[in-house]
Image (spheres, rainbow, N blue to C red):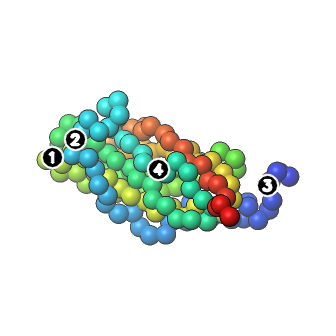
Amino acid sequence: MDLKHPLNEYLQGALAGKMIESPARVGECPTDNNSFPGGAVVQIIAPPVVTTGSSHEVSVRIRNAQSVRAKGVVALQGEDLDRDISYDFQAPFHIAPDQPGAGIVFSWAVPRFRSKIKWSASVTFDGQTCVGLKGRSTTTQVTEPRR
């Protein structure tokens, strides 16, 4: 702990990775594989700006680049760039050969302090031990509500 961040902020962050309001749910995935920038396998969709103490969704889209049946686990991590806090989520996914991909939506309880969160995701496909495909990262700025 340092003098820049009060003790209560550290205590709030102690359970940060457990701040899931509800289990992950299946979300929308574009039907066109060209919707994935630069041919990415994983795409993260997070709000660019949120207010402290609110609740928002962060989505991960997985592209079925080879049009085959695929299943595995998607992992989403939010790293607080101002504090030593991490928000960790994971969920299984299943993609049929005729599906262009899958979308997984996570509900996130925003911290009660200003911060900047860097989101990253990886996918581990079943049958491929310890294979994680890095996705692109994005950030969310946590601000105080306007009064």
Question: Which is more N-terminal, label 1 or label 4?
Answer: 4
Mark 1, mark 2: which one is toward the viewer?
2
Position of residue 1 in the picture relative to residue 146 (left or right) = right
The residue that label 3 is drawn on is 5
Q: How far apart are marks 3 and 2 (CA)?
A: 45 Å
Name the mark on residue 32: 2
Foreground: 64 or 33?
Answer: 33
Mark 3, mark 4: which one is toward the viewer?
4
Query: Is 66 situated above or below 96?
Result: above
Q: How far apart are marks 2 and 4 (CA)?
A: 20 Å
Question: Which is more N-terminal, label 3 or label 1?
Answer: 3
- Amino acid type assigned to the residue bearing label 2 in the image: Asp
Name the mark on residue 46: 4
Where does the image place residue 128, in percent across and percent down from the top left? 32, 42
The residue that label 1 is drawn on is 97
- Amino acid type assigned to the residue bearing label 1 in the image: Pro
Question: Which is more N-terminal, label 2 or label 3?
Answer: 3
Q: Residues within 10 Å of mark 3 (few under 14, many from 20)?
A: few
* Residue name at image x 49 percent, y 39 percent: 137
Residue positioned most to the left: 98
Mark 4, mark 1: which one is toward the viewer?
4
Foreground: 85 or 142?
Answer: 142
Question: Which is more N-terminal, label 2 or label 1?
Answer: 2
Position of residue 51 in the picture relative to residue 4 (left or right) = left
Where does the image place residue 47, in percent across and percent down from the top left? 49, 51
Query: Is 34 situated above or below 2?
Result: above
Foreground: 79 or 46?
Answer: 46
* Residue name at image x 25 percent, y 54 percent: 94
Question: Which is more N-terminal, label 4 or label 2?
Answer: 2
Position of residue 19 in the picture relative to residue 136 (left or right) = right
